[in-house]
Image (cartoon, grey):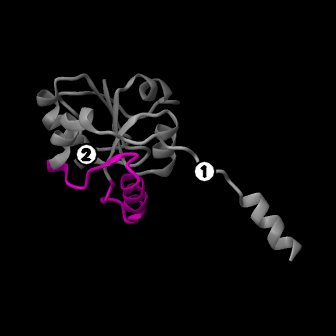
Amino acid sequence: MIFITVGTTAFDSLIQAVDEISLAINKKIICQIADGNYIPTQCEYFRFKPTIEKEFRDAELIICHGGAGTLFKLLELRKKVIAVPNLERSDKHQSDLIDTLSAGNYIISCYKLSDLKDKILDIGKADLKKYEQPKCSIAEEIIKFIDR
């Protein structure tokens, strides 16, 4: 199963692109569409659920926006991820995170929705690295700063 999540913000262009290529993918696709206006006709969908942990666990591939919470949760779960920055938003911070994680070979990035089908079909060839969460040293840095 392939799971698509857009988080809490509409991302109609992603949902529409997935819906249009879904028959060529030949896998069950479930889309979380938030408050989007586009309603998929070829894929199962829902707007929101209290939790999407089950979908995360059950999916063999997750296509998502570039939200930090979503991406780091998926990396923690060791999922194959194709991340598509939601450039429909006014802020463009998703691109920075996607670029960094893609450059580290932890995820696949997709900036052109016309490339999404090929990226999905080629995901089995991807040799992505397992993400290891870095040690957080913020508390130690604060203590050092205070002790100066």
Above or below residue 51? Residue 71 is below
- Determine contact: label 1, label 2, CB under 8 Å: no
Give x and y (percent) for residue 119: 21, 42
Residue 81 in the magenta stretch? The answer is no
Q: Pick whichever, 1 or 20, lies toward us.
A: 1
Residue indicated by mark 2? 14
Disc 1 or 2, which lies upstream in sequence?
2
Residue in the picture at 16% in, 48% down: 115
Q: Pick whichever, 5 or 141, lies toward us.
A: 141
Label 2 crowding class (10 Å Cα cut-off): few <14, some 14-19, many 20+? many
Q: The residue under label 2 is which amino acid type?
A: Leu
Local secondary structure at mark 1:
loop
Label 1 to label 2, Cα distance in Å?
31 Å
Q: Residue furthest right?
A: 147
Residue in the picture at 58% in, 46% down: 133
Tell whether 148 sits left or right of 65: right
Q: Which quadrant is the N terminus positioned in?
A: top left
Q: Nearer the viewer, mark 1 or mark 2?
A: 1
Residue 97 in the magenta stretch? The answer is yes
Residue in the picture at 20% in, 44% down: 116
Q: The residue under label 1 is which amino acid type?
A: Pro
Label 1 crowding class (10 Å Cα cut-off): few <14, some 14-19, many 20+? few
Above or below residue 43? Residue 71 is below
- Residue 134's label in the rendered image is 1
Give x and y (percent) for residue 40: 22, 33
Residue stretch in magenta: 85-114
Could you tell me how many numbered marks the image carries? 2
Tell whether 52 sits left or right of 2: right
